[in-house]
Image: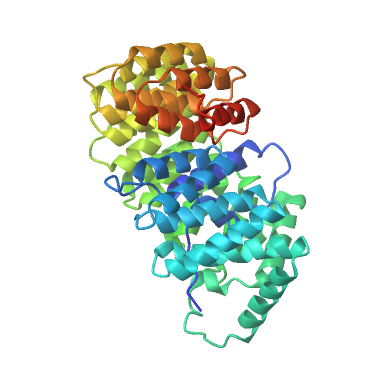
Amino acid sequence: MRKMKSITSAFAIAAVAVAAGQAMAQEVTYVTTTAESQYEQAVAMYDAAFPQDPADSLYRAARERLNWNAYRDAARLFREVYNRYPRSSYAAQAYYYQAFALYRMGTQADLRAAQDALRVLRKDYAEAEVTHYEAEQLLARVQSRLAELGDEDAARAVYDRAVELEEDTDREWQDEEWDRCSQEDEVRMAALHGLINMDPEQAKPILRKVLERTDECPEIRTQALMILSQSSSEEDLPIFLHVAQNDPNRDVRAQAVMWIMNIPGDASIRALEEILMGSDDYDIQGAALMALAQHRDERATQTLREFALREDVSMELRAQAIMWVGYDGTEESKQFLREIYESTEDREIKEGIFMTLATQYGHDDPETARWMMGIAMDENENSEIRQQAMYWAAQSGLPVSELADLYESVEDRQMKEAIWFALVQRHDEDVVDVLLRMAREEEDPELRANMIYWLAQKDDPRVKEFLMEIIEGGGG
C-alpha cells in the first residue's frame, strides 16, 4: 500500500480560504481538508513545465479551459495532447486531467470514459508521478460514482478495493500523520463541526484541548481551527499563533495562519506581517499573504503592495502578492499593478498581472482591456507576452468585431493564431458567424486548417454545414 501524502499548496489554501471567508457570515459548512477537497486543490498544482515540448501550447490551452471549468472542452483538448504527442512529457498528466474533467461532468458515459483513461494511464505510464496517488484516488472516486449509478462492474471494483483495504496488514506506514485518520475520525470531525452550535465560550476549552493533541489525525485539528475561527477575538490570537509555530504538520500550521484573518484588529495584521517576513516556509508565507488580503484594511493592503515590490523573495510569492493586491478591485490597486508591469522583466509576473487585471477588472473596464491590447500590439514586447496579453484582452470583453478587424490588420502569424484562439473561446451570439467568415477568407492553408480544426470543436449547426461545404469541395 502506498503512503498517503498531503497535496495542498499555498494557492490551494488561498482558494479554499476565499470560499470559506465569503461564507463566514452565513452558516459554516464542512471544511475543505478531506481527501475529496484535496483532489479539487490538486488541479491547481500541476503547471506547464516543459516549454520546449511540442505539446506545450496545446497542453496550456487545455489547462486554461480546465481552470475556467469548461470541462468538455478541456477533456477534448487533453485527449488531443496524448493522441497527437504520445511521447510528450505532458502525456501522463493529459490522461489524468482528461479523466478529472470527465469526472466533473458526471454523466455515466463521461465517468466510463474517465475510468478508461485512468486505466490506460496506469498501464502505459506506470512510472509517472501523477499515476501513483492522484490517479488511484481519482479512479476510486470515479468507480464509486459509477456504482451509485448502477454500474455492476464498478460496484464490484469498489467492493474489492474495500476488502483489500480491510485485509491489508502492511503497517510500515502507520506512523504517517495523515494515515492516522480513520472512519472514526470522520465521526469525530462531524462532532467537532457540531460544536459551532454550542455556546462559543463553552466550546473553546474543548477546541483548545483538541489543538494540543498533536498525536492525532491532523484533519481533526484543522476542523478545530476552522470552528474556533468562527467566534474568535483578539484574545484567541495566541492559540492560532501557537499552532502556526508548533504544530508538527505543515498543512495544519498553514491553516492556523489562514484563519487569523477572522480575528479583527491591528494585532492580527501585525501577527501576519511578522509571519510573512519571518518565515522561510513557502506555504506559511502564502497563507499569510492570503489572510492579509481578507482583512481589506489599508495597512494590510500596503503590506501586500510592499511585498509585491520586493526582489529578494521568490517569484511565486511575489505573484501571489500581486494576485491579492488586485483582489480588492480598487482603482489604486489597478494602477499599482500596471506600474509593476512597467518595471519588471519577469514573464511570470507579467502574466500574473494580466490574469489578475482581467479577472478582477476586465469585464467592467474597457480601459484595462485596451491597455492589454496595446501591449499585444507592441512589436518590441516579447512574443509570448504579446500572445498572453491578446488572450486576456479578448477575455475582458473587447467586441468580437474589433478582434476580427484586428486579425485582418496584423501580419505576424503567431498573433493571428492568438487572436483566432481568443475568439474561439468567446461565447458571444455573433462569434460563430464571424469565425466562419474569417475561415472562408483566410488564404494561408496552414492557418485555415487550424481554424477548421478549432471550429470543429464547436457544437453548432452552422459549423457542421461549413464542414460539409469543405468536404464536398465548396468551402473556399
Q: Residue furthest front?
A: 473
User: Residue 80, percent across and down?
Assistant: 46, 47
Q: How many marks?
A: 0
In the picture, measured across the screen, residue 421 lies left or right of residue 459, that is left
User: Residue 162, percent across and down?
Assistant: 66, 77
Q: Nearer the viewer, residue 103 or 232?
A: 103
Q: Residue shown at 43%/59% (left/top)?
A: 92
Q: Is residue 246 above or below residue 413?
A: below
Q: Is residue 244 visible?
A: no
Q: Is residue 302 above or below residue 371?
A: below
User: Residue 128, percent across and down?
Assistant: 39, 65
Q: Is residue 417 above or below residue 148?
A: above
Q: Nearer the viewer, residue 92 or 346?
A: 92
User: Residue 167, percent across and down?
Assistant: 63, 86
Picture quadrant where residue 38 is located: bottom right
Q: Which colour scheme appears in the figure?
A: rainbow
Q: Residue shown at 35%/54% (left/top)?
A: 88
In the picture, measured across the screen, residue 250 lies left or right of residue 66, that is left
Q: Residue shown at 61%/45% (left/top)?
A: 232
Q: Is residue 341 visible?
A: yes
